[in-house]
Amino acid sequence: MRLATWNVNSLNVRLPQVLQWLAENPVDVLALQELKLDQDKFPQAEIEAAGYRAVWYGQKTYNGVALLARAPLSLEDAVAGIPGYDDPQRRVIAATVNGVRVIGAYCVNGESVGSDKYAYKLEWYARLHDYLAAELGQHPDTVLMGDFNIAPDDRDVYDPAAWEGKVLCSRPERDAFAGLLGLGLADAFRLFNQDDKQYSWWDYRAAMFRRNLGLRIDHILLSAPLSARATGCVIDKAPRKWERPSDHAPVVVTLAD
């Protein structure tokens, strides 16, 4: 079973890339973030024509998440948002696919340390932590994947000194990420790759991608039973080289049967 996550930074713009990538990489499940479209504007027909079923939680201009499952797999018991949390921003969607509880998340950016958006980010992560704890209690086979907007370690940042204490890399954010791991989850990428300079996001400006000046902020977190099944996890940089790319690259994990 292969699962992937990709912040597409506007599905309207990036739909051709998503369809091309799925044709070349027929993963079983794909979590998308930053759809940036209303609920009724989701390209369901095109996705289904590509052989995938979908559930989505759209929002105009900002945010928006979706889960795609390769037919004949189905998306069961879908839940949009974090239950009990009245969040106007549409950032989370979950469904069960082939016995695996899949949670896709577009986590809060936070803008800058000390800002209202930063405070919202920390509150949002606390809500995510509690939600995930409840999901793990019901679903031992759980995966959380998406754009976390946190680089959990200095290895995940092209210039740790320049980013020290800044949003995406501040200690409270990294502690929030560590809190998720404390629930018994594993960072799938780090199960297999301990090297530095491995990134999933590069700013569009200043040739950051060509110079490999990025951050690893897109993650796949696996519960213990799924970690035991994991056989590999990679960042696919190829779509970042395409015309009009997202600034993020897909991350893909493979699970043994």
Image (tube, grey):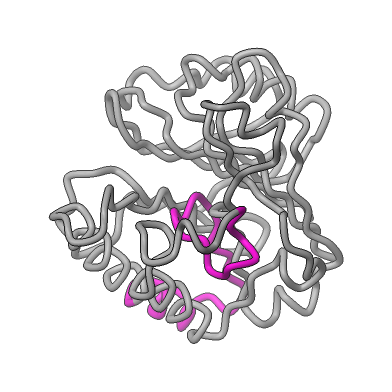
Tell me which residue sits at (73%, 50%) in the image. 252
Position of residue 206 relative to residue 107, above or below, is: above
Task: Tell whether 12 sits left or right of 40.
Answer: right
Residue 17: x and y in percent read 66, 20
Residue 256: x and y in percent read 85, 66
Residue 228: x and y in percent read 78, 79
Tell me which residue sits at (80%, 58%) in the image. 254
Tell me which residue sits at (65%, 31%) in the image. 52
Position of the N terminus, as image quadrant, is bottom right
User: 24 or 112, which lies in front?
Assistant: 112
Assess whether residue 11 is covered by the magenta stretch. Answer: no
* Residue 77 in sight in this render: no
* Residue 66 in sight in this render: yes
User: 228 or 151, which lies in front?
Assistant: 151
Assess whether residue 150 is covered by the magenta stretch. Answer: yes
Task: Tell whether 157 sits left or right of 90.
Answer: right
Q: Quadrant of residue 257?
A: bottom right
Task: Tell whether 158 sits left or right of 112.
Answer: right
In magenta, the rendered stretch is 130-158
Tell me which residue sits at (55%, 57%) in the image. 145
Residue 7: x and y in percent read 52, 38
Q: Quadrant of residue 102?
A: bottom right
- What is the total number of numbered labels drawn onto the structure image? 0
